[in-house]
Amino acid sequence: MTLKLYNTLTKQKEEFVPIHGNRVNMFVCGPTVYDYSHLGHARTYIVFDVIARYLRYRGYSVFYLMNITDVDDKMIKRANETGLSVKGLADRFTDAFHEDMKRLNVMSVNLYAKATEHVDEIISQIKTLIEKGFAYDVDGDVYFEVRKFKDFGKLSKQALDELKAGARIEVDEKKRRPEDFALWKKQKPDEPFWASPWGNGRPGWHVEDTAITTTYFGNKYDLHGGGIDLLFPHHESEIAIAESATGEKPFVKYWVHSGFLTLNKEKMSKSLGNFFTIREVLEKYESEVIRFFMLNAHYRSPIDFSDKGLDEAKQGLERIKNTVDNIKAAAKNAGEGSEGNIPDIIAEARQKFLDAMDDDFNTREAISAVFELTKSVNQAIPDGLSSSALNMIISTYKELGGIIGLFQDEKKEGGITGDLISLIVEIRENARKNKDWETSDKIRNKLKVLGIVVEDAEDGPQVKIR
Ligand code: AMP
């Protein structure tokens, strides 16, 4: 079956055919690192993590690039509020972002590119735009002249007149027309700056991404992702910059946008103040539960966040994981025996899973194939399956789970880490024996946040590392 994906540019599902045979160049807009990332960010990055994983599973050689916006208005404002330098702020929250992504098992990005490390490339792209007559300098500020780019609006399907009337256009007296946008911002007192042909200043937002992608991918590439809020003006402006600068189109072959994570049906966002940070939620729920919750919906549909939703995800995930644990336990003692109809059950589940993923990355349907597999397997276990049948089942969960970043082997911690965990569990056990519930609960809760689950069984504490 062919892989189809919904392209925002053409507004239809299209067959996926990369520009260069088997190679896929993929870019997703990264975070502005002025604060901790929230669960809305997590959704978008989990979605594109799965898209990269699936393309790799299908045999494509994927280069996944993500930018980090480490200088902009919000960064400068927050740095001033906190007394940190813009670089100090950026370093702190870039590290925090990487930690969060690691904990969410978002591990498929090949290269993170910081805006501040690509200022030469940004300046060079702006120079080209001025030379070609698409941009103008007003006393140290440089703007893109939108009406010069005839295709403006082709991604968001808006006419220029509608855009002018729209609310999301930055007001700035210096611009020739309201819809023009900044490529280079003249330095204001105490702001970070770089030298340029137009004087000291810093890059505007949209040109950061186009300069980075042109550097690594050339004038055209395969897939550009991001949340649907970035469609306009960000992605529309990226097209205008890149296609004007290079003279080639389409700059991006497939535009893919993820739906919002909402809270009470309103987009979760920093500016509205209705957000939970990733690390806050990780204190209550395991990372796999968050992934499962996000992926148990189509990536373009909105998801409304609630504890109830996460609790349901937790139950669903546990049903699957308990089955996998039971099969693993059974496989240890199983010998020769019958395979029953396990090969057929597996083939059917795999086909259903892959068909769903081929249909615009429908993870919800793919997960439903895993539930069906789990149900059939549970029915088959009492029949006394052979060890080869049981191992076949285990590797199917591993194979399909690998695509969505779930159901992998529990981490086996050995060496000094294993010894430290044993020591901490022993200290907790002593606290319990002394009825010091406060200490024992505190240790258990802290370990849980780290993905180390301690369960008290009759024969002593059982430790599971997720
Ligand atoms: P930002 O740092 O706000 O530019 O966001 C980084 C990425 O997260 C972008 O791709 C946004 O579209 C995405 N994003 C932000 N808020 C949400 C949300 N509530 N739901 C889904 N994606 C979001």
Image: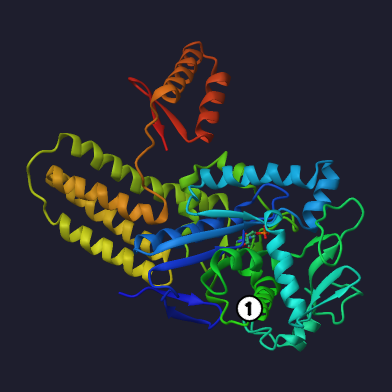
The amino acid marked with disc number 1 is Thr
Image quarter for ligand 1:
bottom right
Residue 258 pos. (x, y %): 55, 66
**Which residue, given by chain and number where applicable, does mark 1 sit on?**
246
| Left or right of residue 150, residue 5 in this image | left
Residue 289 x %, y % = 47, 47
Between residue 64 and residue 233, name the one nearer to us: 64
Q: Quadrant of the C terminus?
A: top left
For image coordinates 37% across by 32% down, the residue present is 412
Q: Quadrant of residue 89?
A: top right
- Relative to 145, does residue 281 appear above or below in the rendering? above
Vertically, is 413 above or below 204? Answer: above
Quarter holding the N terminus? Answer: bottom left
Mark 1 nearby-residue class (10 Å; few <14, some 14–19, many ≥20): some
Q: Is residue 258 visible?
A: no
Q: Is residue 217 left or right of residue 343?
A: right
Q: How far from the left and from the top, in percent, is residue 32?
A: 69, 55
Vertical comparison of 247 with 465: above or below:
below
Task: Return the x and y of residue 58 as percentages of the image width and height.
Answer: 34, 64
